[in-house]
Structures are given as structure tokens and as C-alpha cells.
Image: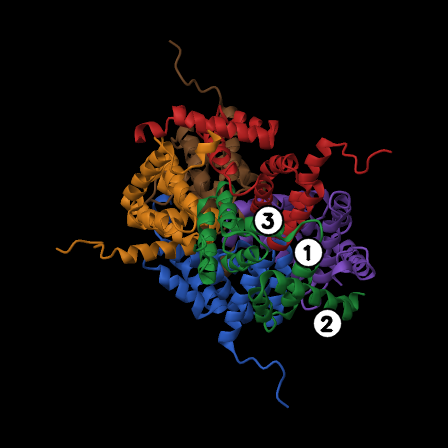
Chain colours: A red, B green, C purple, D orange, E blue, F brown
Amino acid sequence: MSTTQHDVDNAGNLARRQHGLDVLARIDGDAGTAVVDSLADVSPALSHHVAAFAFGDIYDRPGLDARSRQLVTIGVLTALGGCEPQLRIHVGAALNVGLSRDEIVEAILHCAVYAGFPRALNATFAAKGVFDARRPQPTSPAP
Amino acid sequence: MSTTQHDVDNAGNLARRQHGLDVLARIDGDAGTAVVDSLADVSPALSHHVAAFAFGDIYDRPGLDARSRQLVTIGVLTALGGCEPQLRIHVGAALNVGLSRDEIVEAILHCAVYAGFPRALNATFAAKGVFDARRPQPTSPAP
Amino acid sequence: MSTTQHDVDNAGNLARRQHGLDVLARIDGDAGTAVVDSLADVSPALSHHVAAFAFGDIYDRPGLDARSRQLVTIGVLTALGGCEPQLRIHVGAALNVGLSRDEIVEAILHCAVYAGFPRALNATFAAKGVFDARRPQPTSPAP
Amino acid sequence: MSTTQHDVDNAGNLARRQHGLDVLARIDGDAGTAVVDSLADVSPALSHHVAAFAFGDIYDRPGLDARSRQLVTIGVLTALGGCEPQLRIHVGAALNVGLSRDEIVEAILHCAVYAGFPRALNATFAAKGVFDARRPQPTSPAP
Amino acid sequence: MSTTQHDVDNAGNLARRQHGLDVLARIDGDAGTAVVDSLADVSPALSHHVAAFAFGDIYDRPGLDARSRQLVTIGVLTALGGCEPQLRIHVGAALNVGLSRDEIVEAILHCAVYAGFPRALNATFAAKGVFDARRPQPTSPAP
Amino acid sequence: MSTTQHDVDNAGNLARRQHGLDVLARIDGDAGTAVVDSLADVSPALSHHVAAFAFGDIYDRPGLDARSRQLVTIGVLTALGGCEPQLRIHVGAALNVGLSRDEIVEAILHCAVYAGFPRALNATFAAKGVFDARRPQPTSPAP
């Protein structure tokens, strides 16, 4: 096994990766796929493991729904700091799995208590960038 | 206002604090109250702001339910590291607001992707400590 | 109380926020006000709490002068990393409350011991940006 | 695939895990195995992924020898802070793969430049604990 | 120079280290000296550089007084997290250079805004430990 | 000694700095020298200590070769996050001291296990920027 496990293109790894790519496309849309693709040249192994492990093995596990996973992810990425590119993708993913804009900014405000205001400010501005790019969002339907 | 705003015992601040203490007792139980009490001697102002701001102003805001807030909090505390005392309290709070043990460990596993395995290991052991202290939890009812 | 405490526009919260905005304008000048304003659209609650809590409740407390608070803040923001936008505002604030350029870069050099050189380098370059934007500062008076 | 990928006991995952456990035993010895075992009760999935992913998929990849991986790991764990349990295991692993005590403390000293002295102090004391537990190491042979 | 610069016992380095040890003893007292001594066995080079560089080269530089340096240090150490041993030494140092207990806890409360409440809680409890060990401190003089 | 140790232009400090500048030029090339030069105006003391301490005192110590030091450095900088400018310089340095592109990306992939995928992604993209700027690197010689 040890000789083949690290061949990211063996049958088992290909299947794990393909499943992860499907999850990634479903959750993050084109933004997530673009990250994996942009890694393929410089670090094909990292590209593989983002898809196969992060999204294939973990993200899609039963036991925690996608909405809950995005709340956890927003907490982690806000706290880490310096992960604005990843945060933007996951704010988009949060919208995709059904969290509202108000819930996302509320979750980030909640982080201010635990990770401090600067981290919450940076995350809120990252979220704002995602929201602005998806406008218009009618807050009240025209009559 | 500036002369009275910092009097943590003025009427407005007392009301904010009392509300926060109620939220804290409801969510975290005795463990949370014990933290606030233990601060009262060394830093009464920090004790006040944990209650009045963190729990009174933020935690109880509408717009995000307690379950969601605990998921965000677990994400932040796992990512920060070195916050095992706070994590233990919030794992207890997560149980109190309805997250199952399996959901909590799943949320922490999810953090491993974003914050790395050492942080997830430390958080899992902190959770295990809380679970063990609350045993027994029958995983399948006797017939 | 719980039904009204989270109304950021109730009388008590308005007064706390107004006081905070006054402190913010006095310490940080237009740069601080601009941050609060830029949040008002995407996260009015975060905008409120930055003003009401961070500046109204905490920054203006007696017991530690503004100069001391800026020294602590420079230490925290340098250590956190990834907070260059906040660091620039607080370097400006440090100048406003009477710290000299030399004291600010000395404080950041001091951080190198505890948070490492990369954090100190990033903070120094952030400070340099603020200094450059405020030039000219004559280092020796013309005869 | 999605229905079976998350079954950590399917044939592919069992093989990945077994390979990882072999790597773990070879590199970290009993200390590593003990960590995986201690997780099996509270979070069997985390236990699986530490073995299958961290050690099976990543640690044993060709392209970087074990000595180099331990140097990177010491850098990461020293910088993260709060990971003393993991650091102790990896200091032991570093000794196991051929790094000398002097090289390990030199690597941690090197970290002081980038992560600051407190992190380097904590890591050095963690290393000291491992060294002391493995004594005696004659520093000069008796004549 | 390159052949001798790394000899921590050459005349120049001995002088730098001795000066640093004097600063360390003056600021931190026995607690600081104990740390340097405890490193001498496992990492004599780290022991040297803590004294020669951190205290000799940096701490005692003109341009920022000891009180200001301790405020910066408290900010950094509170923000880093996981540095409670260092924080305890520097809380002691802060008392030694003239900061009052109230100023120290106020500085840590200030950190809560920027680094979050858990870091501030941990730092406050570390400070409390130092205060308790130095008791009694009469808060109001006997008549 | 205390009156002269902080004169960064005394004979001993000049020699330490010159040695450090030589190490810096040898390891990091123009990119490292440019950083030291860019600091000379805003913080001459930080500029001195980067050269004299980080490169002169530490980097060139015997006991760990340059390749090993770059592996540790990549681990620390990837874990810290927000240090992309420093990481780019040290990826360049890693190439200069003989690490291959594949080894560098493998080291960063290894970090994903311990510091999480977002940090590894940011570091990989920083490395990619350095690689791209040094192209072309023929991966297979023309016949």
C-alpha cells in the first residue's frame, strides 16, 4: 500500500478526489474550483488533498449539515486572520448553503467577542466584498 | 455621559450586566458564573464586561440562535489555541443548547482542515474532559 | 431588558455610541470615523459596538491614559498580524495622543523580541506609511 | 462513492489507516500510537484521519525525507504555540529519525527570530522534558 | 568576524550578555534570572541571546522607558496566548518598574477589545497569580 | 557597557552588522538587502538588528546547515500567516541554498497537516509567485 498510496492518481485517490470536486462545486461553486485549478500547476499534491481530503473526506461527512459547517468555518477563518481569500470563498459558500447575509455578519460580530474587533472588522469587510459582487439583492420585493 | 458611562454600577450598566448574567447562567450554567465571580476581585471591570457586553449585548442578540453561536464559538476557540478553559465552558454550553456530543466532535474535526490537527486534537481532548465529567450518557437505552 | 438591550438605537445605547464616537473622533480622527461609517451599511451592529463598546466603554475609561493605551494597542496589533489596516489607524492615533515617531518605531522594535521579526517588519512598514502620509515633519528646524 | 467514502472502515480507508499507523509507529513510536488510541473513544473519525491522512497520506510521501519533515514540523509547532503535547511527540520523532539534541535546540533557537522568544522558550522547555525522559545521554564518553 | 561572532563567550558577547543579565535582574528580579539559568543546560545559546539580545540590546535601549516597554510587552504576550509563564514574569516586572495592579489589569482589559475576551481572561488570571503571590498589598492604609 | 551597547555604530556592532549583511546577501540576495535598506530610514535600529542579530548572530551559527534553517523558516512563516513578504524572500533563499521547487512545495504541503489548509494555500501561492518570477526552469531538457 505504501508504494501506491501516494500516487494521487490511483483508482482510490481518483475516486476520493472526484467526489471532493463534486462537493466543492456544489458548495463553493466556481470560486472553489478555481482555487483547486490554480494549484494544479505549482502543487498538484496540495490540489489533490484540498479536493480529496478537505472536501471529499471531511466536508461531506454526515453528522453535521452544510450550514453548521459554514458557521464553524467562518469562526475558524475569522479567528486565524490573514485568510481573507479563503473567507471570501466560504462566505460565498455560506450564502450557497442557505445562510442569509444577516446571519453571516451576525456570526462575524459574534467572533469579535472571542477573537477581538480587528479580526471581526477584516472578516466583515471580506463578507461585504462578496455581498457587493452578488448585488442586487432586493431586500423587499417590488409591489 | 462620559463621566458616568464608565461607572459599571450605574443603572444602565447594572441592567445590561444583570441581563448578561441571566444569559450566562442559562447558557453556560455554573461554569460560566464561576468565571465571572472569580474575576470580580482582580478585575471587576473585566467581570462586568464579560457579563454585560459578551453575554448581554452580543450572545443574546436575535438573528442567530444559540446553537449556531456555539458552532461559531467552537470554531474560534479551536483556532485560537491556548483557550482550553474557555473551550471547556463552551463545550458544556453547546451541550446545554442542544448540540450532541457527536456534533461537537464533528465540528472540531471540521476545524482540523482549517486550523490544523494539533488545534483539533487539543480541542477534542478538552471536549472529552467535559463529556467524561457529565457521564454516564447511555448511548443506547437498555431494553 | 432583554427585548430592548439589543436595540442599538434605544436611548442608553445611543448615548453610549455617541460618547464612543466622540472618543473615536478625538483619538483617531477621520480615519477612525471612516471605519465606523464604512461598516454602517453591511453590519450596523458591529459599527455600533466598535463605537459604543470599544471606544465608549473601554478606551475612555479612567485608570490608563491614552498614551499607555496606544502602547498596549501597538503591542497587540503587531503580535496579531494581519491587522495592518487597524495598525495604521492606531499609529495615527498614537501620534495624535503624543507619542513621537521614534517612540512608535521603538515600541515596534520591542515587539520583535516577543512576536518575532516578521511581525515587527510588517508593523514598521505600516507605521512608515502613516508617517509618509503626514510629511513633512522637519527633523531639525530651519535656522 | 459519497455513501462509502465516509465509512472509515471500508477497504480503502482501512488500508490507508493501517499504512498511516505503520508510519506513525515507525516515526513517533509509542507516544504517537497512544495519541491515536486515546482519540478512538471520543472521536474515532479524528483518530482515523490523524493516521490515514496526516501520517499515511502526507508524512510518508516521497519528495522530502523524514529529517526534513521534522524540521518543518518543529518550525510550525513552535510558531503555533499551545501545542506542547504535539511538540513533545515530534521532538521524540526528531530524535528517532536522526536529528541530534543539539540540532533540535538549534532549530528552536532559529525560530526565536521569526516567532519571538516566548514561543522559543516554551518549545525549548518542551524539548528539555523529552531529553530528560530519555537520559542518560553521555555527552562525552568515559575514558 | 564570522568565525568568532558565534562564540557566545568571546569578549564582546560576554559584555553584551553581562549587561543584559544586569538589566534582567533589575527589571524581572529572580524570576527572570531563573529562566536564563534553567536554559543554560539545554540551550546555552538561547540562554545567551535572551540575556544579550532581548535584555541587553533591546530592553535597555534609550527612547522608551521601562514602564512603556512593559505596557507593550503585556499587549504582545496577551495577544500571543499560550505565554502565561512569560506573562507572569512580565507582570512582576511591570510591578517592579512602577505600574500599579490597577493599571496592569486595565491594560489587559484594553487587550480584550483587540485580542478577544479569552486571551484577556487568561492574562488576567496570570496577573492574579502574581498579585496573590506578592500579598498582602493594603488597598487602604490603616488609620 | 550600557552606555555604548545601544550605539549600533560602535565597533562591535558594526562588525556584527557587517557580518550579518554578508550572510543576508549570500542567502537572500538582493531581496534581503532591499528589506534592510528600506528600513534604514524609518527604523535604523530594526534595520541593524535584522542584520546583526537575525542574520549575523543566528542564521550563520554552526550546528544547522542553511538548507535545514530554510525548512524551519518555511514552517514558521507558513504557520504564522500574514508574513507573505517574508515568505517570498525565504522561498527565494531556499532556492538559493539548494532546495528544489518540489521540496519547497512539499514542505508547505506538510504544513497543511499542522497549520491547516488556508495557511498552506497562502504559502503555496507566495512560492508560486517566486517561482514564476524566476522562470524559465526547464523541467525536462530539450533533446
Q: Amino acid at mark 2?
A: Asp
Q: CA distance from mark 1 to mark 3?
A: 13 Å
Q: Position of residue B1 (x, y in %)?
A: 81, 65
Query: Marks 1 and 2, how far apart in space?
Result: 20 Å
Callout 2 secondary element: loop
Circle 3 SS class? helix
The earlier-in-sequence mark between 1 and 2 is: 2
| Closer to viewer: mark 1 or mark 2 | 1
Query: Disc 3 marks which residue?
Result: B72
Residue A22 as seen in the image, left or right of residue C43: left
* Residue C86 relative to residue A10: left or right: right
Residue C114 x %, y %: 51, 54
The residue marked by circle 2 belongs to what chain? B
Per the rendering, the mark at residue B104 is none
- Above or below, B70 against E33 in this view is above
Mark 2 and mark 3 lie on one chain; the one further toward the N terminus is: 2
Q: Give the quarter of the image for residue E63.
A: bottom right
Q: Is residue D53 visible?
A: yes
> Residue at the spot x=54%, y=41% of the render?
F83
Residue type at mark 3?
Val
- Where is mark 2, residue-wise? B9
**Residue extending furthest right?**
A143
- Looking at the figure, which quarter contains the N terminus of chain A? top left
Which residue, as the protein is rendered here, is positioned at the far bottom? E143
Q: Which residue position holds label 1?
A: B58
